[in-house]
Amino acid sequence: MNSLSVMQLPAALEAWTGFDTRLMVVAGLGIALIVVLITKFKLHPFLALILGSAFVGLAAGVEPALVIKNFEDGVGGVLKEVGLLIALGAMLGKLLADSGGANRVVDTLLAKATGQKLVWAITLVAVIIGLPMFFEIGLVLLLPVIVLVTQRSKMPLMRIAIPALAGLSVLHGLVPPHPGPLIAISAVKAELGTTLALGLLVAIPTVIICGPLFSRLAAKWVPVGAPAVAGGIDTVHGADLEGVKRRPSFLVTLLTIIFPVVLMLLKAVMDIIWPDAATAPWIRTFFDFVGQPLVAMTLAVLLAMFTFGYAVGFTGSKITSKIGASLGPIAGIMLIVGAGGGFKQTLIGAGVGDSVKKWAEGSNMSVLLLGFIVAVALRLATGSATVATVTAAGIVAPLASSLSPTHAALLALAIGAGSLFLSHVNDAGFWLVKELFGLTVGQTFKTWSVMETLISVVSFGFIILLSLVI
């Protein structure tokens, strides 16, 4: 049995210098600059990250040409790993919504649920919808459902909303193929299948505690009813169903949603059964290929073109149009993700990662705790879970080389947990929740912000427990 001490780092081998102090100050100022540009001057995060990267590189004494190269390498490194998956996830989500498949899942799971069962049913709906969809897309899709269920059940809004928000948020922060977990997995060189399995193991109890259970307190703190939804429930029910002759069945929808996850899990199983690829049978090679995130997501989109496309009555041109329409809304997300990778590589190129490693070795801190704390600090500073994940993963990546595959996966999850800590006024998600549910700033803090902090702390607690037994 491993203990947490196994994950601790040896005593410092290199002394801390004045240059290390300078680098940390510069990094802090760079992060502060990004925050001020985004919050005070309302500059787009993409441009703010570019300017912050330039400041950090030049102030750290890096040659101007190398500052540019580090940033470009960081952008390319992140987008080649994650950018394609973001695009494929958007395609899958668009087809799921516009075919009526998402509505089918919601209707089926809520059909027989009454009373307190509604709380658990909406949690399950959020988890299923949250597997392939970004948090923001899933929230907009579920909003009319949350309002409708609240109105019909006469229950407080937070008893229904918090479980839905928790399901979407936990999946988005901890479970691939969402961008944050994939970025962390890539940076610390963790195995995707192992991280996926452990992520689900952490996610399930975290959703239960921070969703249905916490919603009881949230409903007492903020006892509000369903918000008014402009246009009525039916007109905002998530998707454009024009051209749909028959909605996909619940089973077909569910199988399509979990298809890429199953492929990735099967790859992990084959790696365990036949750890030596050189002597493994052809089936190991096959699942090594189809279980790669890019291949799994591509196959899922191709499958969705039939189950959520031709099978529901869409023509080929209609499917192509919907896939094209899915890419526009994610352009900004991809730019921010790429620029976050550029900022991360700028920090690493300037030597910040090495300085953090020195500090960590000297403090003898668990690398899991270090990854969590760094991600928390960046989340509080920038308001972006993605930027926090990208930057924190890059900073602690040098410390992950000596970890076992299991502990590398736990480190990726610890970073993801830290990136969810205390969403507040510099986070777009804070304002999205406030506006969609018609809350005041204070009410949003009491519900959404507390829930996000609880998710971060509870999930990290489960990660630590896993590190003690595996």
Image (cartoon, grey):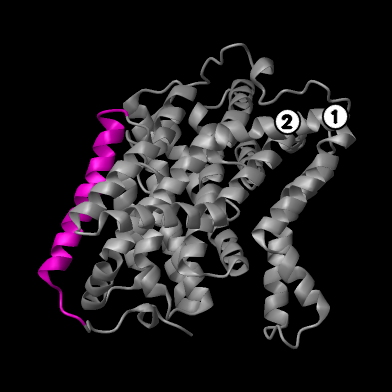
Q: Which class describes the residues within 10 Å of circle 1: few (<14), some (14-19), or many (20+)?
A: many
Outermost residue, front direction?
A: 65
**Residue at image point 21% right, 77% down:** 362
Outermost residue, bottom direction?
A: 279
Q: Which class describes the residues within 10 Å of circle 2: few (<14), some (14-19), or many (20+)?
A: some
- The three-letter code of the residue at mark 1 reads Phe
Q: Is residue 308 left or right of residue 460?
A: right
Q: Can residue 3 be seen in this view?
A: yes
Image marks 2 and 1: residues in contact by CB distance under 8 Å: yes
Q: Write down the quadrant of residue 329 in the picture.
A: top right
Q: Which of 230 and 379 is in front in this view?
A: 379
The image position of residue 25, as x and y in percent, is 16, 56
Q: Mark 2 to mark 1: distance in Å?
A: 10 Å
Q: In this view, does 281 lie above or below 139?
A: below
Q: Nearer the viewer, residue 40 or 432?
A: 40
Counting the numbered discs, the total is 2
Is residue 185 part of the magenta span, yes or no?
no
The image position of residue 141, as x and y in percent, is 62, 30
Mark 2 or 1, nearer chain start: 1
The image position of residue 386, as x and y in percent, is 44, 48
**Residue at image point 36% right, 67% down:** 396
Q: Write down the quadrant of residue 43 in the picture.
A: top left
Q: Residue 322 carries which label?
A: 2
Q: Bounds of the magenta span?
A: 14-42
Q: Write down the quadrant of residue 282 in the picture.
A: bottom right
- Where is mark 1, residue-wise? 314
Would you say the magenta stretch is mainly helix, strand or loop?
A: helix
